[in-house]
Image: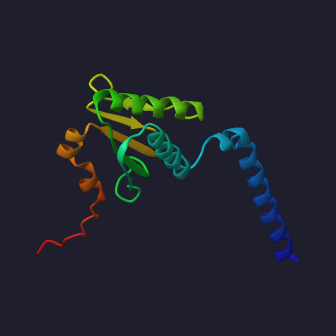
Amino acid sequence: MVAGTQRKDRDLTIRTAIRRIQRKAPPAELMAAKASSAHLLSSILSILDDAKAENVVAIEIAGKSSLGDHMVVASGRSQRHVGAAADQIVQKLKEEGYHRIRVEGMPTCDWVLVDAGDVIVHIFRPEVREFYNLEKMWSADKPSDVMAS
C-alpha cells in the first residue's frame, strides 16, 4: 500500500511540475515566430539568390564555434552590390520577424558582416574575399588533440 501511495505522490508532483512549466512557457505565437537555424539559413540563402550574390557558400560551424550554427560567405560584384545585398538581408529578415540583427562594415562595403544570431553572413568584394579566405579557415576540421611528450 505504501508503494502505491508513493507512486501517486510522484505522479502528482510530475503533473504539478508540468503545469508550472506550461504556465511559464512563452506564448505559442512567439514560439511560432522564432524559427530554427535551418529555416533562417534557408531564408538567407534565398535572399542572397534574389540579390544575385555570387559564389555563395554555407558552412556549418555548430561544432567548431559558439558564434552560431552556420556561416554564409558570398561575393558581390562591387561595393554597391555588397551593400545592397546586405540591406536586402536585413530588410527581409526584419519582415520575417527577426529583429536582433547586427551589421558591420556598411560604410565601406568591402566586407559586410550580418549577424542574424544562429547564422552569420559575410559578403565580400571578390578581391577582399580572396585575401581573407574565410571558407578555408572555417571549413577545416578541428585538429585532434595532440598529447605533449
Q: Residue at x 30, y 58 (%)?
A: 139
- Residue 47 percent coordinates (x, y): 49, 40
Q: Does 33 sit above or below residue 5? A: above
Q: Is residue 109 left or right of residue 131?
A: right
**Residue 86 image-quadrant placement:** top left
Q: Nearer the viewer, residue 79 or 96?
A: 79
> Is the N terminus in the top left, top right, bottom left or bottom right quadrant?
bottom right
Q: Residue at x 67, y 38 (%)?
A: 30
Task: Note whether residue 99 is visible.
Answer: no
Task: Note whether residue 139 is visible.
Answer: yes
Q: Does 84 sit above or below residue 33? A: above
Q: Is residue 67 left or right of residue 39?
A: left
Q: Residue at x 14, y 71 (%)?
A: 148
- Residue 101 percent coordinates (x, y): 46, 32
**Residue 128 image-quadrant placement:** top left
- Residue 13 percent coordinates (x, y): 77, 59
- Residue 137 percent coordinates (x, y): 24, 54
> Is the C terminus in the top left, top right, bottom left or bottom right quadrant?
bottom left
Farthest right residue?
1
Q: Residue at x 71, y 49 (%)?
A: 21
Farthest left residue?
149
